[in-house]
């Protein structure tokens, strides 16, 4: 066997790193948010450098200046870049080595990902860095250009020199110009950029642990701490405990609640937001307007809510671009749920006001639609458990009430079926509970019917008034006729709840047969073709009977409100007696299919009503008729025709309306409808 021969490799086995490809694959597409991320990275580096140099004195001694660079140095010119200057520790040898190392772990304890400067290469054509620092031989200055447009090595023109006399320690990062795609998305206003900076570094601002930061735009200077504090109205801090893994202890999070004036909105669109920060930098946010149902807040109604959630769990799971987190959506949902609950507690005074308005509106809906009465006993609970804070309109509340009523009915129907099929032991809810639910449903249905009656009577009251007050002209007859019973209708086509004969007498509401404005030949054996005279409209009558009893046939004749044309030839008493004769001539009442409804004999009794306005001419005509006797209350007239086996009562519209109201008054008062 031949021994294995060792061959010297021609190329050393080293891992090649392609920085151009690394920047190209960086998850940082051009957008309004990402256009400012390189600026945020430069500011973050300045904060870390100041912390390294000044330690506990960082807040008082540290300073960062951000200068907006505009095209042509014009105030209205587009933004082409930024200059960020800090008085931090500078690019010492250790920091310089880290800067030149992709994905460096130098600042890993601070949450540094080691890729922030790659965002500079992604968004800007060129970057110039000048840094003074304390070296072994005194104050040193390092300067270089940082760009991929001059070759695969991004560092160019590097120079290191000793500075005499000594210069101020610190670093200036000159980010300019933008790549075209990023420049197009950059905000144009200094106030917008100031708000974005505050939003991104919100954890520093809410805790007050940051150095002086100034934004300069030409002659305009914005102190970000002052900008934040002047626009803050109220704040609070709470601890959240959220179980994210059943096998581990709950994770703790800090949540900072802040009311800020709307001038300091961090995000376009919406009012209220919750931000999630990892390593002191906001990495995710969510608009929560729909979950709060609130508009502007505060003493003057000019504030928005901002919540900031921080914690070790977020620090450990922020992605490298600082644009999201690496844990699951389900875990994020749990954190967000706890944050929303805490936010609602912070905003309780405003939310309670919304709930009170929702309860008031829902109560009004129930009063007008009492089929929902079962929900009134626990109205506050219904609102809390079923209406989102964003449910403001009456229509939305009505739909939710209808939805809950339908679900309750389905549940009740299911329980009743089980109770019937399998006995009470098979139903988890007690029979008493089912009975109560059943009673509540029936009460709601009855209340709905009563409200409908109230509305009909109000409409009738309006219909009896003058249509034209100046001309003293009444509404046409069709209006009142259709209100009580539709013209040319019959009992086969209408259910009992589709007519309003109860206005005359509650017993009439349940008669099972009637005809309105139909020729007698269509429902009797007679051949009379008398039909309503359309010029007079109410010259035809309604006829009906009740099932199961030898009830009289009832004839009702309506006369137009305000009518004055009555004489011997147009006597309504004579007219209804003629109708009695036509019934008897027909010998029987039949339905539309020819089936016998009721035989008409000489023994069949008739009860006739005439409803009209009591004008002088009508009273004169009645005086010479059989219906000349005043009623007990003196408001109508009555009489009896033994020859026709018929009684006749003549009543004014005002009495019909008032009596109907009196009969239903107790129901109206009970429902608060009086």
Image (cartoon, rainbow, N blue to C red):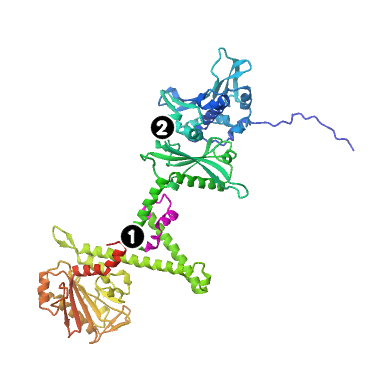
Residue at left 30%, top 76%?
511
Side (left or right) of 478 relative to 158:
left
Q: Residue furthest top?
A: 165
Q: Quadrant of residue 488?
A: bottom left
Q: Earlier in the sequence, mark 1 or mark 2?
A: 2
Question: Could you tell me residue 481's position as x and y percent?
Answer: 23, 68
Secondary structure type for disc 2: helix
Residue at left 63%, top 15%?
137
Q: Which residue is mark 2?
A: 230
Q: Which residue is mark 1?
A: 367
Of residue 108 and residue 124, the one placed in the foreground of this image is 108
The secondary structure that dominates the magenta segment is: helix
Of residue 154 and residue 61, the one placed in the foreground of this image is 61
Q: Is residue 375 magenta?
A: yes
Question: Could you tell me residue 561's position as x and y percent?
Answer: 17, 67
Q: Residues within 10 Å of mark 2 (few under 14, many from 20)?
A: few
Residue at left 12%, top 76%?
622
Span colored in magenta: 371-395
Question: Could you tell me residue 139's position as x and y percent?
Answer: 59, 16
Q: Is residue 317 above or below residue 100?
A: below
Of residue 133 and residue 159, the one placed in the foreground of this image is 133
């Amino acid at each position: 066997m031949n021994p294995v021969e060792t061959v010297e490799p021609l190329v050393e086995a080293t891992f090649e790193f392609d920085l151009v490809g690394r920047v190209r694959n960086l998850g940082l597409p051009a957008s309004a948010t990402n256009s400012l991320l390189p600026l945020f990275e430069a500011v973050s580096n300045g904060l870390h450098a100041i912390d390294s140099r000044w330690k506990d004195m960082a807040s008082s001694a540290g300073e960062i200046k951000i200068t907006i660079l505009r095209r042509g140095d014009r105030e209205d010119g587009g933004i082409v870049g930024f200059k960020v200057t800090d008085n931090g520790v500078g690019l010492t040898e250790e920091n310089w080595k880290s800067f030149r190392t992709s994905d460096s772990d130098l600042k890993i304890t601070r949450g540094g990902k080691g890729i922030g400067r790659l965002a500079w290469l992604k968004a800007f054509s060129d970057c110039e860095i000048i840094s003074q620092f304390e070296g072994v031989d005194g104050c040193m200055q390092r300067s270089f250009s940082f760009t991929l447009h001059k070759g695969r090595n991004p560092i160019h023109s590097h120079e290191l020199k000793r500075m005499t006399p000594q210069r101020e320690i610190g670093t200036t990062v000159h980010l300019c110009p933008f790549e075209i795609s990023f420049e197009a998305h950059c905000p144009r206003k200094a106030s917008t950029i100031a708000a974005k900076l505050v939003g991104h570094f919100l954890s520093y601002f809410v805790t007050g642990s940051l150095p002086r930061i100034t934004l300069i735009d030409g002659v305009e200077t914005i102190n970000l701490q002052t900008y934040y504090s002047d626009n803050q109205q109220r704040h609070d801090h709470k601890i959240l405990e959220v179980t994210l893994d059943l096998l581990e202890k709950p994770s703790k999070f800090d949540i900072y609640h802040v009311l800020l004036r709307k001038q300091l909105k961090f995000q376009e669109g919406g009012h209220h937001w919750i931000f999630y920060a990892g390593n002191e930098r906001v990495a995710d946010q969510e608009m929560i307007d729909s979950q709060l149902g609130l508009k502007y807040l505060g003493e003057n109604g000019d504030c928005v809510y901002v919540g900031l959630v921080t914690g070790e769990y977020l620090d450990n799971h922020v992605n490298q671009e600082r644009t999201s987190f690496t844990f699951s959506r389900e875990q994020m949902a749990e954190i967000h749920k706890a944050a929303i609950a805490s936010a609602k507690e912070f905003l309780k005074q405003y939310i309670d006001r919304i709930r009170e308005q929702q309860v008031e509106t829902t109560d009004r809906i129930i009063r007008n639609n009492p089929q929902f009465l079962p929900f009134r006993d626990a109205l506050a609970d219904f609102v809390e458990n079923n209406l989102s804070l964003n449910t403001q309109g009456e229509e939305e509340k009505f739909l939710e009430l209808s939805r809950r009523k339908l679900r309750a009915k389905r549940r009740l129907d299911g329980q009743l079926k089980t109770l019937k099929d399998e006995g009470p032991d098979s139903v988890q809810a007690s029979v008493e509970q089912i009975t109560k639910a059943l009673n509540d449903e029936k009460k709601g249905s009855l209340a709905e019917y009563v409200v409908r009656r109230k509305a009909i009577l109000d409409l009738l009251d309006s219909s009896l008034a003058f249509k034209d007050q100046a001309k003293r002209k009444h509404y046409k007859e069709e209006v009142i006729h259709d209100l009580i019973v539709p013209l040319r209708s019959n009992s086969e086509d209408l259910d009992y709840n589709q007519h309003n004969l109860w206005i005359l007498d509650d017993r009439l509401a349940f008669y099972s047969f009637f005809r309105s404005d139909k020729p007698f030949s269509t429902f009797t054996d007679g051949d009379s073709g008398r039909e309503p005279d359309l010029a007079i409209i109410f010259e035809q009558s309604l006829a009906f009977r009740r099932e199961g009893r030898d009830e009289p046939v009832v004839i009702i004749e309506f006369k137009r409100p305000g009518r004055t044309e009555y004489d011997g030839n147009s006597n309504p008493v004579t007219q209804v007696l003629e109708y009695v004769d036509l019934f008897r001539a027909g010998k029987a009442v039949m339905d539309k299919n020819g089936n016998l409804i009721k035989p008409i004999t000489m023994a069949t009794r008739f009860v006739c009503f005439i409803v009209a306005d009591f004008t002088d001419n009508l009273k004169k005509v009645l005086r010479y008729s059989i219906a000349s006797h005043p009623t007990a209350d003196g408001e109508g007239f009555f009489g009896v025709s033994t020859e026709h086996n018929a009684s006749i009562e003549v009543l004014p519209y005002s009495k019909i309306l008032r009596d109907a109201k009196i009969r239903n008054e107790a129901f109206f008062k009970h429902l608060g409808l009086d």
